Image: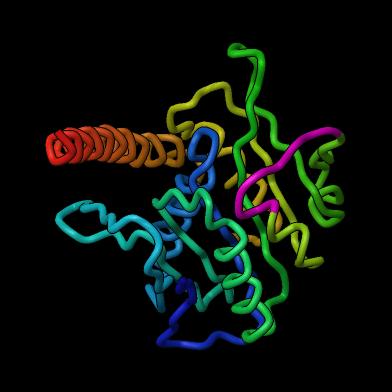
Amino acid sequence: MLIKINLKKIPKGPTIIEGFPGFGLVGTIATEFMIEHLKAELIGEFVYDNLPATVAIHKSKLVRPMAVYYSVTYNLIILHTILNTKGLEWKVAESIIDFAHKIKAKEIISIEGVGSTSPDADTKVYCFGKKFEELGVEPVSESIIMGVTAAIMLKYPKIQCLFASTHSQLPDSKAAARVIEILDKYLGLKVDYLPLIQQAEEFEKKLRSLIKEQASAESEADKKNMSYLG
């Protein structure tokens, strides 16, 4: 089983932000927005042989399924993925932690969506980590975290987490926008908030289309497999 990160450039002591597909796709939307806003450079990608062969096309360009971007201005690495890593969370987390140690990362910031029981409630962002508490973000007191982020939390002490509440199983751009707002205060990214939600919603449409096409492709594949068995 192969999962590792290959780089063509080695930053020194950066902050790493990771956003894997999860509830509301908050992490994926937020990292996509940061990549575009910061004009981050593609410097590497995950190499693997046990995950689905998936790729997206956006504005006639390939979107790497698990890619590593870098903003030299902010010494910031952004891990962006559109792949479901279910069943391989530990391996993916180990590759990120090894990567963080090799480049002497300052910290890892994880972005996640968490379910809200009230569809009419305003989006709230909670944190795990003292640095965000100092900005006035409410610490999470009770929750269950799963996936790659949970695996990193158990094995890497220098992790800060932002959890945005969302009541939608569909991509939630507003929740992602609230996370970006906090990251801007923490990292000084100079985000123009006026077009933020509009841009996030455009990416949301792209993700909805991708999800629909992927579901259709999986359905066709299942039909073919059934015909082979029949």
User: How is the protein colored in the picture?
Assistant: rainbow
Which corner quadrant of the image does residue 227 belong to? Answer: top left
* Stretch of the chain drawn in magenta: 142-150
Residue occupying image coordinates x 46% and y 71%: 1
Q: Main secondary structure of the magenta part?
A: loop
The mark tally for this picture is 0
In the foreground, 103 or 197: 103
Residue occupying image coordinates x 41% and y 78%: 43
Name above or below for residue 188 compared with residue 180.
below
Is residue 218 visible in the rendered image? The answer is: yes
Q: Which residue is most to the front?
A: 230
Which corner quadrant of the image does residue 118 belong to? Answer: top right
Asked if residue 30 lies left or right of residue 226, the reply is right
In the foreground, 111 or 149: 149
Asked if residue 167 lies left or right of residue 65, the reply is right
Name above or below for residue 226 compared with residue 180.
above
Residue occupying image coordinates x 53% and y 57%: 88
In the foreground, 145 or 124: 145
Residue 31, percent from left and from top: 49, 54
Residue 99, percent from left and from top: 59, 78
Residue 27 falls within the magenta-colored stretch: no
Asked if residue 141 lies left or right of residue 22, the reply is right
Asked if residue 78 lies left or right of residue 32, the reply is right
Name above or below for residue 127 compared with residue 92.
above
